[in-house]
Amino acid sequence: NAGVTQTPKFRILKIGQSMTLQCTQDMNHNYMYWYRQDPGMGLKLIYYSVGAGITDKGEVPNGYNVSRSTTEDFPLRLELAAPSQTSVYFCASRGAADTYEQYFGPGTRLTVT
Amino acid sequence: AQKITQTQPGMFVQEKEAVTLDCTYDTSDPSYGLFWYKQPSSGEMIFLIYQGSYDQQNATEGRYSLNFQKARKSANLVISASQLGDSAMYFCAMREASLKNTDKLIFGTGTRLQVFP
């Protein structure tokens, strides 16, 4: 089991560029989440999904889009990158039968200049 | 609105001593859960311990225990016999209950723990 994997690990974007952060889990988890962590802060929820085809906004969704076409994958799309999106992005997943623990990926460090 | 507060930006502890990291929360929902995660300098988020609001006993996992005081709305993490490898950032988080059972987490700002020899 690889758990939750994220690619890329690091990325530098220019203002106005777009990119997709990839997230894949191999635990057959229904629930998946995207968080961002700004320097010196806790994590904030961007988007989440309760299953394939179903997504919903979290606390800070502006500037992002997601899709969930399969159980395994939950990509996060940044359109028109802005310096305010410089952050570390974490993907997480949870199975319905778990004791609420969310399993986190290793994170993607994104810098927008 | 639900909120998690960690008032200690940084803590120091000597190796082999116990340390308590504070966490208070605010919610009007009777059903909730509290987590502690560890984030070492390498950046990954490591689950440590979970406490449900209806759990009768305080949660324990090895050297970690959660001092859950419901009336005071506090969920402090106690690390016994600290080790150098415990040096990390520690986050308290609350599970936001919902009818959809989506389990969105609300995080505090974290406490940086440094263990010295």
Image (spheres, coloured by chain):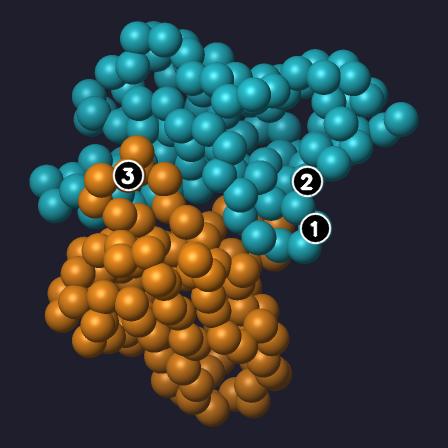
Quarter of the view holding residue B3: top left
Secondary structure at numbered mark 3: loop
Marks 2/3: CA–CA distance = 26 Å
Task: Name the residue that disc number 2 marks.
Answer: B88
Q: Secondary structure at mark 1?
A: loop
Position of B89 relative to B31 (above/below) = below
Residue at coordinates 22% horizontally, 60% vertically from top-left? Answer: A49
**In this rendering, would A112 be left or right of B50?**
right
- Chain A drawing hue: orange
Q: Circle 1: is it few (<14), some (14-19), or many (20+) Cα within 10 Å?
A: few
The residue that appears at 66% across and 46% down in the rendered structure is B40
Mark 3 closeness class: few <14, some 14–19, many ≥20 residues within 10 Å: few
Mark 1 lies on residue? B41
Disc 3 vs disc 1: which is toward the camera? 3
Q: Are marks 1 and 2 in contact (CB under 8 Å)?
A: yes
Q: Which mark, residue A98?
A: 3
Q: Chain of mark 2?
A: B
**Residue B35 on image: x %, y %:** 42, 32
| Chain ID for cyan | B
